[in-house]
Image (cartoon, rainbow, N blue to C red):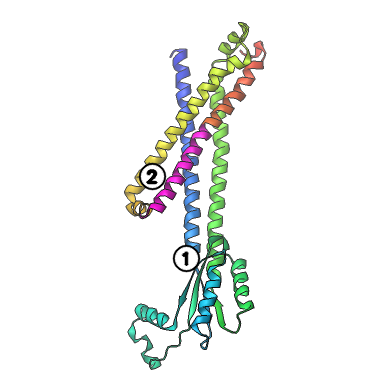
Amino acid sequence: MSKTTKIKTAEISTVLGMSLLIFLLGLLAYLLVITNSVAKDIKEQLVVDVYFRDDVREIDVRKLEKEIVSLPYVIKANYVSKDSAKALLMQQQGEDVFEILDGINPLRQLIAVNLTSEYVNKDSALAFKKYLLSDNEYIIDEVFYNQSHFLEIGNSFSKLEYFLVGAASLLLIIAILLINNTIRLAIFSKRFLIRTMQLVGAKSRFIRRPFLISALYQGMFAGFLAMLLLLGTGYLLAEFNPQSVINITASEESLEKEMIIVGSIFIGMLFLGMFISYISTFSALNKYLWIKTDKLF
């Protein structure tokens, strides 16, 4: 195998190695974004029910509903009358559920409140409850929410997010070390060329330029390959789970949001490949630009 062939093989292996590692980082980044999105959706589906006393007028409940909706950490607040609650229960449990009560409706009117995901935690929910009861004890009978759900959902997704961030950080360190080592080996094979250029009077900036430009192209190409791998993975997942594609394209807003996420990850992958390749090449070049001649052998 000729020297030129060996150099080309080293460059190809460098690009392929970078592509695989950048792909894995991009995949972890996408999983982290999806985890955050799913966690947000689930948290915002949790409901805080505000029950009212039987003698409270609807106009007073509606007034409080407007006040609750105006709060910055409230997504929505829906008023449910006694008759609406009865109709909903009959729809779910059957029309005979009220027969034993001789037509009496024991249900209370309520406001169902959905909080923002940032506010769905044990302490914030308790603070919201105290806020409601502070000036409205005379009309509010009870503020109910499932404390275990508020606590468990937040903790579960936090652990998963920490795991993904930890895995991505570890993979990033491994990627930098492996790519740096591969590029050092590639520069090592050109150490005599570097020394020859120095002997004919070439300055360090002139010597670095072609290597650094080549490093940027290699990093860019590795980023593009990683993008293709991620797109291919997404295509395969869509083949096995077509419902995910239906959910993404269900509305223009969700499609636009998904495109922004994927575009941001792609740009990050591209610049990561270029950055790691450039820095590793610059570092390796410095070693052979200042090394003594007897240590080249």
> x%, y% of residue 242?
32, 52
Determine the image quadrant of residue 285: top right
Specify which label sits upstream in the sequence, 1 or 2: 1
**Residue identified by numbered label 2:** 234
Position of the C terminus by quadrant: top right
Q: Residue furthest top?
A: 200
Marker count (numbered): 2
Q: Which mark is residue 45?
A: 1
Q: Residue at x 45, y 29 (%)?
A: 221
Which of the pair 30/119 is nearer the observer? 119
Q: Residue at x 37, y 40 (%)?
A: 232
Tell me which amino acid carries mark 1: Gln
- Classed neighbour count for the residue bearing mark 1: other residues with Cα under 10 Å, few (<14), some (14–19), many (≥20): some
Tell me which amino acid carries mark 2: Gly
Query: Element under label 1?
Result: helix
Residue span colored magenta: 250-273
Q: Which mark is residue 98?
A: none
